[in-house]
Amino acid sequence: MSIKITMPALSPTMETGNLAKWLVKEGDSVRSGDVIAEIETDKATMEVEAADEGVVAKLVVPAGSDNVKVNSLIAVLAEEGEDAAQVAKNALAENGSAAVPAPQQQQAGGSALPVLAGQNSAAAGEQNPVSAAKTAGIFASPLARRLAAQAGLNLTAITGSGPRGRIIQRDVEAAKRAGGAAAAAGAAAGSAPAPAADESAILAVFRPEDYKIVPHQPIRKVIARRLVESKQHIPHFYVTADCNLDALLKLRSDLNMAAPVIKKEEGSAPAYRLSVNDMIIKAVAVALKRVPDANVSWLDSGMIRHKHSDIGVAVAIPDGLITPIIRQAEEKSLSAISAEMKDLIKRAKQMKLKPEEYQGGTSSVSNMGMFGVKDFAAIINPPQATIFAIGAGEKRATVKDGAVVIADIMSVTLSADHRAVDGALAAELVQCFKNIIENPLALLI
């Protein structure tokens, strides 16, 4: 009996994924555990392993297909003794009838899928390849994708005329002649929360020749949705304090100078190199341990009180942001946090993080000090109740023992969920963080 391979759910919230690359081809033999494909989610690129052995009879979804629904068929294996060609034929017949949905009917108060100029009503009333693309990936040739990107066209608004509705060069050219940019805007509006009229009104104030529409990447859509949900449902409030960094900077310098040298094939290097951010992560973790009432998450049914400080750290990646998590940071040494953070940042930029490495967390750190930002307020990352926004350390005039002196000062702003953390508790947490930063030997205990 043939073995069906479906789009896996790589995280609890995953609904679709992009089939980035096939690592096998039709006719190849695979064994259980062999890596056969790379799947892009909104946050990472994951490898998919074969669960059974067999011969690749058919790659149903081409490499490069976007928005492939979880549990939809992507490939079929023929078992020993089966005719691979017949298995492939059966898979195409099955998938062809199941993958194309019924035509979308106009709803009361709504609108049907956009129809490109020049497309007759009979074609629009048939099973729509655009709908199929939305549910089983956008089927387009590499050339068509490149031409569409150059023209600023949204592939979801283009009807494919190739085999099985595949979008090919002539489809893109037809869309360009038919005013495809406007159609693409209409398609984007049809799938976005805002009404299409809003987007039309925005586009109306610009000349068509002065802009192009660049489709959102999956990660950007997820970020937008989560930020809107956070600001809509979480009552944010903010507490800011200034921290004197002089003692922390001296301790960091002393610890880095004392780092043992390790000999490697490419030469010698210190065992660790601490950053200010490494010390801030530890300071947040220790502060949450000392103020446990703030190390919580809100549920309507009750309060989650966390036993450990799992600290997410905002990392900029292409097209978005991700927050890999240092688990149980309050128990780890500064050198361990530094090494783990370097690894997480490297893999985050390569989109290679596992879901458990960026989901959850009890609080977060967002540091824009390296960009010269003095202070800012960050948006809480649910289900967390707090996030620390770290500004740049800079020389400022301050008063010490009744005299004006120059010191390195850093502003920190805590964003807190007022349902879970009251004002006095937030102030206590920020004051605790400030004390640890200004008396950093606490980071070594």
Image (cartoon, grey):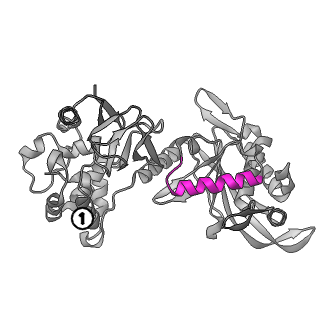
Q: Mark 1 points at which residue?
A: 147
Name the main secondary structure of what is drawn in magenta: helix
Farthest-out residue, right: 401
For the residue carrying disc 1, how many other residues have a C-alpha within 10 Å: few (<14), some (14-19), or many (20+)? some
Q: Residue visible at 29% across and 35% down? A: 76
Q: Residue visible at 18% across and 35% down? A: 89
Q: Where is residue 50 in the image (x, y as percent from the top left)?
A: 40, 36
Residue 432 relative to residue 371: left or right: right
Q: Give the range drawn in magenta.
A: 334-353
Q: Residue visible at 86% across and 55% down? A: 441
For the image, the number of numbered tags is 1
**Residue type at tag 1:** Leu
258 versus 163 height, above or below:
below
The answer to if 401 sits in the magenta stretch is no
Seen from the viewer's position, the closer of residues 91 and 372 is 91
Quarter that holds the N terminus = top left
Seen from the viewer's position, the closer of residues 238 and 190 is 190
Seen from the viewer's position, the closer of residues 81 and 110 is 81
Farthest-out residue, front: 81
The answer to if 344 sits in the magenta stretch is yes
Residue 138 relative to residue 70: left or right: left
Dot 1 lies on which element?
helix
Q: Position of residue 374 (x, y in %)?
A: 66, 67
Res. 240 visible in picture: no
Q: Residue visible at 64% across and 57% down? A: 342
Q: Quadrant of residue 170?
A: bottom left
Q: Position of residue 310 (x, y in %)?
A: 67, 43
